[in-house]
Image (cartoon, grey):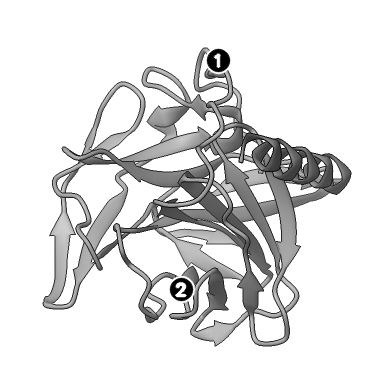
Amino acid sequence: MHRLHRLITSALLCSAALAGTARAHQVWLEQTPATAQLYFGEFNENLREVSPGLLDRFVQPTATLVTARGEQPLKADKAANGFVLSARAGAGESIVAQDAGYPVRERKEGDKVIRTAWTPAARLLGAGSTAALAPRLALDIVPTGRAGEYQVVYAGRPLPKAKVGVAVQSGWGRELHTDDQGIVRLAQPWQGTYVLEVHHVDKTPGERNGKPYDIASYVTTLSLTQTDGLAALPAAPAAAPAAAPAAAPNK
């Protein structure tokens, strides 16, 4: 078994190196037996931004617990390194969270100013959540009901040929692509938390909080926990958060 573990780990780490996955900042959800928390940073680098710091760029994330009985809004209280939610997801339940009020960003391209509305969002599956789920976020990643299969949906429609980043906290990661129906299939050999990430840009102009934008940019993650399989690889050393909120994260 130990030899098999080493062989699988070596093969997967090699595929990750070949994929050359590079990640920008994201939000993701994790939970313990006591609570659930929304983090901002880079999961595969074990980086969690803090307050004071880049965490302070968030206006007020919203979170919802989704159960078979209905939906329950959750409180999101800012802590030193994330937002602590008022409830966690139980077996067969899910949590979705997002910040739809993140400030519109501006950048210059020659003489033109480009305004971007960025929407970071996250979904978490509670233990034993294998049933198909309906999308709830503008850009969402949902299980299809088949083991290791997930669907990426934008504005209620499957998103084909989308890049999906996959990471575990050891730093291992790889990049997959959805098929014509927005489906992606994922091997989950290790126990522990997996985070899937998808990014989509919509160049339809709009307005956020009274400020116009040219581009809507979405980054959504899906957190899930694998309870069987090979022992989880050790977490990567924690990366240092940004010292102050003056520098914007890379998106």
Report the residue marked by disc 2: 143
Comparing 211 with 221, the one in front is 221
Amino acid marked by disc 2: Pro
Q: Nearer the viewer, mark 2 or mark 1?
A: 2
Amino acid carrying label 1: it is Ala
The disc placed on residue 240 is 1
Task: Left or right? Give the position of 43 relative to 30.
Answer: right
Q: Measured along the vertical axis of the image, is residue 63 above or below residue 79?
A: below
Task: Judge left or right: residue 13 versus residue 191.
Answer: right
Residue drawn at x 16%, y 60% as measured from the top left: 73
Element marked by disc 2: strand
Residue found at x 47% / y 45%: 191
Give the residue displayed 38% in from the left and 72% down from the top: 130
Q: Where's residue 224, x and y in %?
A: 43, 55
Q: Is residue 120 visible?
A: yes
Q: Nearer the viewer, residue 242 or 128?
A: 128
Using the numbered discs, state the Cα–Cα distance from disc 2 to disc 1 in whole angstroms. Answer: 33 Å
